[in-house]
Image (cartoon, grey):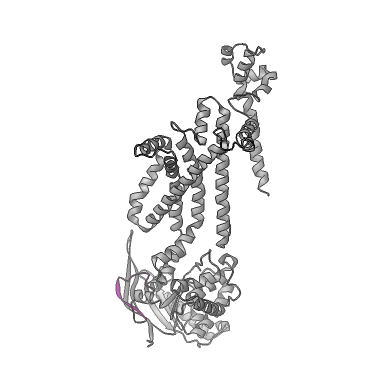
Amino acid sequence: MRNLLPIFTVVGLIVAVWYAAVAPMNIRSALDQLERSDHAVVPAGALERREVSVWYLLVNNPNQIAVTYDLERSRLPTPTQIGYELWKSTGEMLLRGKAMSKRSLLYHGWVTLQSTLWGFFLGTTVGVMGAIFIVYSRIVELSLMPWAIISQTIPIVALAPMIIVLSSQIGIESRGLPKAMISAYLCFFPVLVGLTKGLRSPALSQMDLLKTYNASSVQVFFKLRLPASVPFLFTSLKVGIAAALVGTIVGELPTGAISGLGARILIGDQFGNPLAIWAALFAAAIIAGILVTFLDLLQRFTLHQMGMRV
Amino acid sequence: MRQDVAILTESLDLTFQTNDGPVQALKDVNLTINHGDFVSFIGPSGCGKTTFLRVAAGLELPTGGRVTVNGMTPDQARKNRAYGYVFQAAGLYPWRTISGNIKLPLEIMRYPQKEQNERLQKVLKLVELEGFEKKFPWQLSGGMQQRASIARALAFDAEILLMDEPFGALDEIVRDHLNEQLLALWHQTGKTIAFVTHSIPEAAYLSTKVVVMSPRPGRISEIIDSTLPADRNLDIRDTSEFLSMTHRIREGLRAGHAYE
């Protein structure tokens, strides 16, 4: 529980900075709206206001500042507004029995979560296989590792549309598989690097000891390399699953996607609705938090079972 | 049929190829270790004592000369599991309990479960670690961890025990105690022990034969047969025979230019 105080201190700071930023971010559009509904604002006229700084506007319209916290389509919504939007599009819809409606973030979050888990599964499999091959073959390491590194230098936003276009060319019409591939593309790398390091972590004397027992390479793998790699593997999996979520959302951004948190972000952008974007972002963050926490608990449990100090 | 000679080397050479050119780690090493001997290897760093042990274990290949272990090549001996090797660091697996660690060689050699447990109990008794089998290594002191690693090497009944500075990282009080235990264990089991050390009193106290080595190139400068009685305890270190033994070892090291 002693962890809670520092955590809440940081959260409190972020929220305070956020609320402080809302007024300068929204004052222009607030004054524009007020002027249109015949309120007196200083200076009058949108063009004139563009000539002065937001600070000047705040100082000269002290009575209008409250409005910036309650705009319908604000540039920067307040955390309260986002919280309410999140509730409206999740809990409230659930209560009304419309959890899987197209307007519900539960539905879009579920779509994104499914693709994330598929991508995570695919990426982890590729990463684990790659790491095993790399550890056991110098040739594979020399030929595969540079490509693995290069693959991560390519911006995923450039690659994602191509994967979708190309997979539709070979007859894959659903978006699930290409999205999982994009997600796996981001996710495999931390698993590959982390597990390679983990499988190589046993000291030379540990390897020599097994050699004095005349152990087979299968025994070396299962009795030494694999258990030694477990802490490394979990660290990588936690990075990997967060990367898989980012990959899925990026995969949902390009043309034509209508479901998933990425699609919600894009639609919010196109229809000038920052609140929808923020709500989708928070939903993504919550999903990532749950996934990473789950893996963290699994790690603690596993290492505890293995007798290691966590 | 039991041969008298456990480890035999004839004009053994080993040269490592390094980036700075060849380094001669062992040069013309001739040594006979009989069954039941307790042989210590002493000398400064870089004199090849660990390398010698690794050659005998089949972990390094000599570049010249001949070496046999129980009449076989070191590699055959390794495959026949003729020796147990105790490394400088205890090297216990943190994810296995003490009993899991001691059973590791037995699992690898596919002993039946029942025999694994019998052997476990036997060696736990030998190293006085009964009652600790369910503990994990981090719950034990350094000396106890090293005892567990010795038990691990004893578990599969190898004739020969190769020990590479097993007590080097321990404090003197623990070390004295473990030396005493090791001697008792050697008396009980009648094993052949090759023991690498940096400590003159340790070599004098433990061994029936002390091999003094000197560096660059690593070679034997003197082989000293112990004049001490086979049955000894720590008190022997205050006797004049013990002092003359340590004196001879020190002279041997000096003669081999080990102090330069």
Q: Quadrant of residue B133?
A: bottom right
Residue stretch rendered in magenta on the structure = B58-71
Residue B94 percent across, percent down from the top left:
53, 64
Whole-percent x and y of residue A307? 57, 63
Res. A287 visible in picture? yes
Decide which of B35, A32 is in the foreground and name it.
Answer: A32
Instruction: Give the image quarter of residue A301.
Output: bottom right
Using the image, determine if residue B133 lies above or below residue B36: above
Asked whether residue B62 is drawn in magenta, I would say yes
Picture layout, residue A9 above or below residue A226: above
- Is residue B47 found left or right of A72 in the rendered image? left
Q: Residue at x 51, y 40 (%)?
A: A111
Q: Is residue B173 left or right of residue A221?
A: right
Q: Position of residue A200 (x, y in %)?
A: 43, 58
Q: Nearer the viewer, residue A181 or B8?
A: A181
Q: Position of residue B116 (x, y in %)?
A: 50, 76
Residue A203 in view: no
Residue occupying the point 34% across, 53% down: A140
In the image, taking residue A1 as reference, residue B99 lies left or right, namely: left
Residue closer to the observer: A84 or A198: A84
Position of residue A163 relative to residue B233, above or below, is above
Give the residue at x 47% y 76%: B112
Query: For residue A71: magenta?
Result: no
- The foreground one among B88 and A19 is A19
The quarter of the picture where the C terminus of chain A appears is bottom right
Q: Residue furthest right?
A: A63
